[in-house]
Image: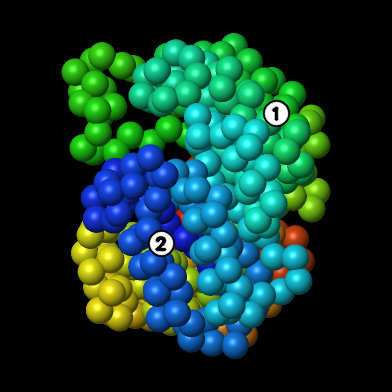
Amino acid sequence: MAGIYIHIPFCKKICYYCDFYKKRDTGSHGDFIKALKKEILLRKDYPGQELIETVYFGGGTPSVLLPEEVQILLDALYSTFTFIDKPEITFECNPEDLNPEYLKALKLIGINRLSIGCQSFDDRDLLLMNRRHNAGKSIDSVIMAHEAGFNNISIDLIYGFPGMTTKGWEKNLETALSLPIQHLSAYILTIEGKTVFNKWLKEGKIHLPDDKEIIKQYHILTEKAGNAGMIHYEISNFGKKNYFSRHNQIYWQQKKYIGLGPSAHSYDLYSRQWNIADTREYILKINREEVPCEKEIINEDMRFDEYVLTSMRTMWGIDLSWMKDHFITRKIDDLVNTLERWEKTGYVRKRADHYFLTDKGILLSDKILADCMIV
């Protein structure tokens, strides 16, 4: 099985080199859509004989596309690749882009899973993040999606946020879990180097919660999500039974995936490819029937590390039986020795041929996983 990932850059990047400026009243992204269709044909042999089980419109801003543009892309995918029955088709969207008509149109063309980037249900947080929506719009977007017939809805939340208190995080979660959602992704805020947040942090304009507070917020997350019937199946992901993200599991289970669009990544088990980020250059090269990507060959040590990294993040853990069929014994023995040391500390546990992170191990996951790496 394989998956398809379609990256839609921010609207201004799409519009930089397409006919949007000529047809501003229609919202058309014609040249960009044509390029994506052409890349689909250029990549038709990439997954080999693999069946496609998921499509994920995500990264950037897919919800700037008109439903008929999404339909064009889906038609091109279905006519080019072979799909399983009832594939998972996820559409990532911002709350401010959603309305009842748009949602009904997405449902009608075959989108069967939504991932809504709420981020927070606290207006102070959203203002600090420079988001265009407020908490009320986030709530309305989920309810509208449910009323439009979507029964597989995921939302994103961020914790460890500047100024976030335990009480504030509890309120965030209570609001989220009171909504008709089946999946929750919750991430600790990460501040990157060249960002406004990093500048403010250095200038003392914002202050992050300390480690004790973040740990407390994490425990509140797992407790409240569990009480709401959510299964903690990956470090940052919770889903009700039968509602885990099938697309994300393709990444975690080391299956093939094809990335389409600027900045999109692909993986065929032996190499990783990533398309150029510049939308204008992407369209120009695709029109010359070139796939505008760079490529990295994945050697055995890198595959080993990737398997350990992705599998240990999930509730299924490392499968030693599977590893014995794919890697040499020496590497597996070294890994087991490392995991046994962590097992003695209570951060890792073993069941049959599987190793898992414990609850307290998840909080130290970066250090544990780094200790397990070869490269």
The residues bearing labels 1 and 2 have C-alpha atoms spaced at a distance of 30 Å
The quadrant of the image that shows the C terminus is bottom left
Residue at 39% of width from left, 67% of height from top? 34
Circle 2 residues within 10 Å: few <14, some 14–19, many ≥20 = many
Please report contact status of discs 1 and 2: CB closer than 8 Å, yes or no: no
Quadrant of res 51: bottom right
Q: Amino acid at mark 2?
A: Ile
Closer to the camera in the image, 204 or 318: 204
Closer to the camera in the image, 359 or 15: 15
Q: Is residue 330 left or right of residue 201?
A: right
Quadrant of res 127: top left
Q: Is residue 126 above or below residue 142?
A: above
Query: Residue tagged by mark 1?
Result: 143
Q: Position of residue 331 (x, y in %)?
A: 49, 77
Q: Amino acid at mark 1?
A: Ile
Q: Is residue 28 left or right of residue 76?
A: left
Circle 1 residues within 10 Å: few <14, some 14–19, many ≥20 = some
What secondary structure is found at the residue carrying circle 2?
Answer: helix
Q: Is residue 324 visible?
A: no
Query: Residue tagged by mark 2?
Result: 33
Q: Position of residue 124 (x, y in %)?
A: 44, 13
The quadrant of the image that shows the N terminus is bottom right
Closer to the camera in the image, 217 or 294: 294
Q: Position of residue 373 (x, y in %)?
A: 42, 64
Residue at 73% of width from left, 43% of height from top? 150
Q: Is residue 101 left or right of residue 146?
A: left
